[in-house]
Amino acid sequence: MAKQKYYVVWAGKKPGIYTSWAETQLQVNQFTGAKFKSYESQKEAEAAYRAGPSKNWGQGQKPKTAAKPTETNSEHASIIMDSLSVDVGCSGNPGIVEYKGVDTQSGEVIFAVGPISKGTNNMGEFLAIVHALAHLKKLGSSRTIYSDSRTALKWVQQKQAASTLVRDDSTKEIWELMDRAVKWLQSNTYTNKVLKWETKEWGEIKADYGRK
């Protein structure tokens, strides 16, 4: 689970202390002169809120963790709600794997695959992204895709999976899917953005299996 953070909004639509980046965004997005900052504890946040922005607020930017670039995305100021979110459920690593894609806004399950007899978490994450890309291409949709796996995002970007899982009879099923996914990436183009879900700021990804 991501560590709880507290967001102080001194200047925004409704000043106060918030416990998620999504709530904070609602207060500061499109608000001229917004002043806000994240803290590791409620006590720190309350003290900073009482003291006011002059002693605590820096450059008026998003919390620093939200500004980190990823392999595929350096622009994650806000969640793109018209998107698909994907995630994997893995019982053991390696172990039984399943994955799904959901509508980010509604939570509706768009596709679900598994259980696959044996694989790794990263392989499941990779398959979920490629499945989402193929699904959206078939629909002619340019919707954004979110994943919370940096490794899988890198594999998609490189169009090659670098898993060290041994190929044998027990892993034949997932490796066949992986080979197919890599082939799809290498023979298709797409315009969809494939972005990192910023768990620290936004909470668990909408497709999360809740098994942590």
Image (cartoon, rainbow, N blue to C red):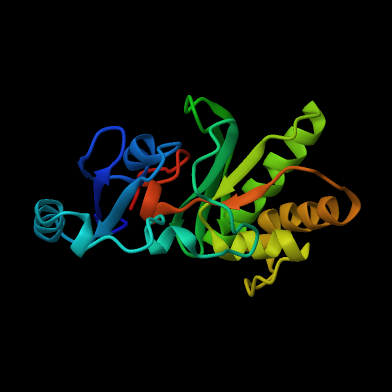
Vertical relation: 144 (above or below) 149 = above
Image point (45%, 36%), residue name: 30
Query: Would residue 126 appear left or right of 37 to someone viewing this image?
Result: right
Residue 41 at x, y percent in the picture: 16, 60
| Observer-nearest of 194 and 112 | 194
Would you identify the image quadrant in which residue 52 lies?
bottom left
Residue 53 at x, y percent in the picture: 22, 55
Residue 192 at x, y percent in the picture: 73, 42
Can residue 154 be seen here? The reply is yes
Image point (26%, 46%), residue name: 9
Would you identify the image quadrant in which residue 120 lies?
bottom right
Query: Would residue 90 appear left or right of 37 to someone viewing this image?
Result: right
Q: What count of labels does the image hold?
A: 0
Would you identify the image quadrant in which residue 178 lies?
bottom right
Vertical relation: 49 (above or below) 84 = below
Image point (62%, 57%), residue name: 73
Can residue 120 be seen here? The reply is no
Residue farthest to the right, as pictured: 187
| Observer-nearest of 133 and 33 | 33
Quadrant housing the N terminus: bottom left
Image point (47%, 28%), residue name: 107
Vertical relation: 142 (above or below) 127 = above
